[in-house]
Amino acid sequence: MGLMKRKSLEGPSEESSPPSKQQRENDLIITDESVACVHDVSYPEGYVPCSNLSLAQEDSKPAKEFPFKLDPFQSEAINCLDSGESVMVSAHTSAGKTVVALYAIAMSLRNKQRVIYTSPIKALSNQKYREFKEEFSDVGLMTGDVTIDPNASCLVMTTEIWRSMQYKGSEITREVAWVIFDEVHYMRDRERGVVWEESIVMAPKNSRFVFLSATVPNAKEFADWVAKVHQQPCHIVYTDYRPTPLQHYVFPSGGDGLYLVVDENGKFREDSFQKALNALVPSNEGDRKRENGKWKKNLAVGKAGEESDIFKMVKMIIQRQYDPVILFSFSKRECETLAMQMAKMDLNVDDEKVTIETIFWSAMDMLSDDDKKLPQASVVSNMLPLLKRGIGVHHSGLLPILKEVIEILFQEGLIKCLFATETFSIGLNMPAKTVVFTNVRKFDGDKFRWISSGEYIQMSGRAGRRGIDDRGICILMVDEKLEPSTAKMMLKGSADSLNSAFHLSYNMLLNQMRCEDGDPENLLRNSFYQFQADRAIPDLEKQRKDLEKERDSIVIEEEDSLENYYSLLEQYKSLKKDVRDIVFAPRYCLPFLQPGRLVSIQCTKSDETSSSFSIENQVTWGVIINFERVKGRSEDDANRKPEDANYTVDVLTKCAVDSLSSVRLMIPKDLLPLEARENTLKKVSEVLSRFAKEGMPLLDPEEDMKVQSSSYRKAVRRIEALENLFEKHEIAKSPLIEQKLKVLHMKKELTAKIKLIKRTIRSSTALAFKDELKARKRVLRRLGYVTSDDVVELKGKVACEISSADELTLTELMFNGVFKDIKVEEMVSLLSCFVWQEKLQDAQKPRDELEFLFTQLQDTARRVAKVQLESKVQIDVENFVSSFRSDIMEAVYAWAKGSEILRDYGNHSSLRGQLDQGYQETGRSSSAANTSSKIHWRN
Amino acid sequence: MRGLQLSLNQTQKIRLQKALETLEYLSSKANSNASVTVADTIPVNYEDGVLKGHGTAENDGEVVATLCGVVERVNKLIYVRTLRARYKPEIGDIIVGRVIEVAPKRWRLEINFSQDAVLMLSSMNLPDGIQRRRTAVDELNMRSIFEENDVICAEVRGFQHDGSLHLQARSEKYGKIERGQLLTVAPYLVKRRKQHFHHLEQYGIDLILGCNGFIWVGEHVEAKDDMIEDRASKSEQQNAKSSKYSMSLEEQEKTYTPLETRQNICRTANAVRVLSSLGFSITVEVIIETVELSISLNLDIHEMLGAEFCVLVAEGEAERRRRLMKKKG
């Protein structure tokens, strides 16, 4: 890239001295190996560092002094801030990145500048607000739910709010000198990540940034991007340092001991890892042999009469005084069931119990009377006794108030053992001494997978409290045979790199198009996605060159005629396949697939390419033993008998029946006994030897099987013609034909690969998302949101205001008059469909009026999706339509009516929290709908 | 022909009449029954459930227009777009306005709307491009940014909760505009486009078509990319400004506009005048065409406002539209 780069990896051995003129950026002195950090700067192209700025600052006092000695990475980052330049700090969660943020805030306040702190999560924003408020007092908070003191100099907000502020041209954007993006690695989030890119690209030109992120290997790349987009230097301070070192243990399920796998110096201990795996109770021990996804039941239930693994584990932790402990699992339900098993355990003494009860009830007093009355049996009655014993549960399905209580109790050390989901690992600073992974696999929407090293790092980062524990402990419960390499990857792997998750949305396009100089293409050009794609080009070029060289090095004599032959072969093969497809269409071949028929079987091996260059196919003969329909499909599930094996093979998918013979054998009904099988095998070989000379009599497709189709006849004729050609072909007689063909085939494959790479290069040199942008603009034009020369029309202006729901569908609904005559409750209930994503098992079917509205919604959605499809946006119409869920319509309706929803819905208590969230979301989108409707009524 | 006070001779009158008739004929073909006057019934199909928008009312079960204009339909929404009305700001409009008052932390601007617009001090980028909170000193120095009677170009930011209209200046290209002419045309003649800033390179002038009907024609100014680098010179400038009469020679040199550019400005301004008096919608293409026509006819600038040129422009427009219709079939 055209960026000027200088790298200075400081260490005692580093000798390369940079130009003395620019010494300032490079003087980093590391005193202690273990706390070393890397400092690096990205300069935009043609940037001339001006040194007088820093000189002016030299004599002034630091904006804030800390009562403790700063770690090298902290003081390094603060130096960058002092010189007024952007910085990206990449360090572990507990390393103390907040110090940098605090300094930036203090500095801005001193300079009478505004500073904005954004974080991905509301809870984190709230926590930081309280923290900053204590420290600086001139602090405001803006989240989707609350706004406190929006005129304060330091504003804490969620990133989404910051983005919409920039679109609206809020005056804050002209006053903000520093923007702090906490947890910026959220940028790789599939859904929300794009918000970070938008807000970074659109940020005011003259502001400076502080990026705080977990450890990412490509921090440099990110900084380069920022430097390029904003034409300002951006420093990177990276450190691997953990204030409390971690020890990683493995707990094999069924076993009863911990095995130290990675010690506090980061060394992987192969031998003890092997020991741990050997200690795994063999998995085929009766009840363990189950589907992979169900294994956790075992963990929960345990063997009858025995304590479950998790119980043993917690007991051990308590005995060894490794508490407090956080136990991560990957589903809300699992979290709760695991906690329930701890019911027998008591971790608190009496006076702690009293404290817990006081805290709990004083919090619960905040709830309305209605709420308290409700039979939230499992929440109030089950939770409190659990809490009193020092056991807690924390996941997103809980009531917010309950979550908060649990957080407080945990911070106070009153909860010794907390079962939490992954959400607990992000942001909020609540470390424990020990972290346990109850599972090493996670369901990510469509399949189970190993947790990635990045996730592992994030979650294990919760282990070890700074200043309290001298080391953090991390325990991995392993139940399946885990390859040492996989485990190593997980435990020792590098953090996930920061990749762009950029995608387009209509709201984004409309907002960009509405501005005079806004241009969606501009945003795309400046996106991190584009930046990363641009970077990949040189690499791809190199690959292409290598492949081309390889291809050119393959020289074949008589290439032309060989090629000719090759293409003939290809044709021949495809024709053969056509014929087979016709003949073996279930219509024709089903009547002949009786038990006893001899069939020839083509073994499709994985190394097919090597053997498929002759006209003769390698086939074996077998006999159909059984044939039945499978699950209503007319696929033949023929249990056949390959002659080189002594038992039936029931895997058909890898082989394909090649042809049917007209011979049918009598076979015994019961093939299970070995004798019968051997008998049958003998019979088969007998038949084969009998027909060895004249070849097996085959069923003639036309006469015997009554295949009557013109395409079949045509194909057969062409095959004959081709066979003739083969014979005439001179090259066919060449002795090395096989090898030559193989070489040719290789060459062809290389060419194909080169083509593929070329296409990738072309698509990345072109603007990423260009086609999609075009298609989406087409949609907007067709639906009348913008005119043909990109002027945003009435509908477009409405859609601009809708950011938390599907903007097109909602706008269409509005303009179709769906909202015109309906009551507020119905409206709110309808809007709930836009925000509710999950499936409820016991969802009530909405009443007729609501059902009617929902059908209208579905119709509109279908129409919108169809227009998108016609405009070549990649979309699955039915999927899109069913993404609107009616599951909570009825509940929301009741809520909006103000009836005691809780009596009706309190019984599925765990849902309450989710419902609450749903309501808030609904509220937000209805206020958006409100603003947008204002637009058109003013008209 | 409204507002057109020209002394036409007989032939010119007939020619103009004919051209305007052609135009009327052509436009009536395009949207024949969409225009309504007050109390006209707007045909709708009630079963679909319509949304009655601006300029409509229900009377005896029928939707009736309460304004003269063109009926617009957006899905189920029906509203009447008036043909001639006062400017109504929409978010994102580019407008040109004149400062009428410097108030605490804000300027008040006349923008041809029923109320004055407000441009907050904090909605302006500071002259030195620094990002910071505005201080009392900044407030005292507001006149060094804009004074009364300055012409300003800005973007409509939106209505605040108290109903006042707020403007903003998103980037460097907004702000004070100098050395040119401000023309006022009927706001409905300016259509919303993607671009409202135009740089006519061949003439060395800037053209800003404000959505509010204020049109600026002025000498081209290079948008300054980096304000920081000439911060020093800027402050000097401000000092110089405070003592208005002692304008240095250099300063005069800087503000000098070459004669040719001035002529171009006048020519373009006259083109806009002719177009607006004929009631043609004003786009940059039509303006350029008109200017070129006047140059090709070797007309002096002042002659552009004469009867003959006016008729020629009308005829030219009629011809252009006829060709356009033919092309469409």
Image: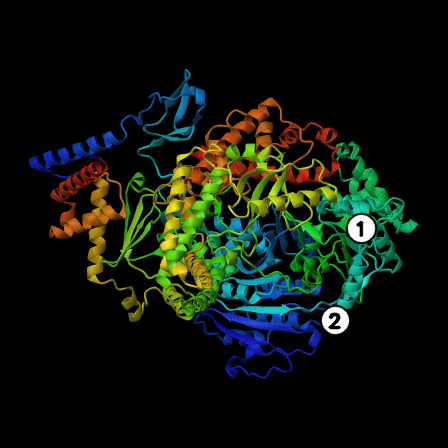
Task: Please name the residue shown 53% across and 38% down the image.
Answer: A880
Q: Position of residue B84 (x, y in %)?
A: 31, 34
Q: Secondary structure at mark 2?
A: loop
The answer to whether residue B300 is seen in the rendering is: no
Residue type marked 2: Asn
Q: Is residue A204 above or below residue A220?
A: above
Q: Which residue is mark 1?
A: A409
Q: Quadrant of residue A709?
A: top left
Task: Please name the residue shown 51% across and 82% down the image.
Answer: A19
Which sits earlier in the primary sequence, circle 1 or circle 2?
Answer: 2
The chain letter for the residue carrying disc 2 is A
Residue type marked 1: Leu
The answer to whether residue A580 is seen in the rendering is: yes
Q: Position of residue A657 (x, y in %)?
A: 55, 43
Q: Are marks 1 and 2 on the same chain?
A: yes
The chain letter for the residue carrying disc 1 is A
- Residue A265 - label: 2
Within-10-Å neighbours for mark 2: few <14, some 14–19, many 20+: few
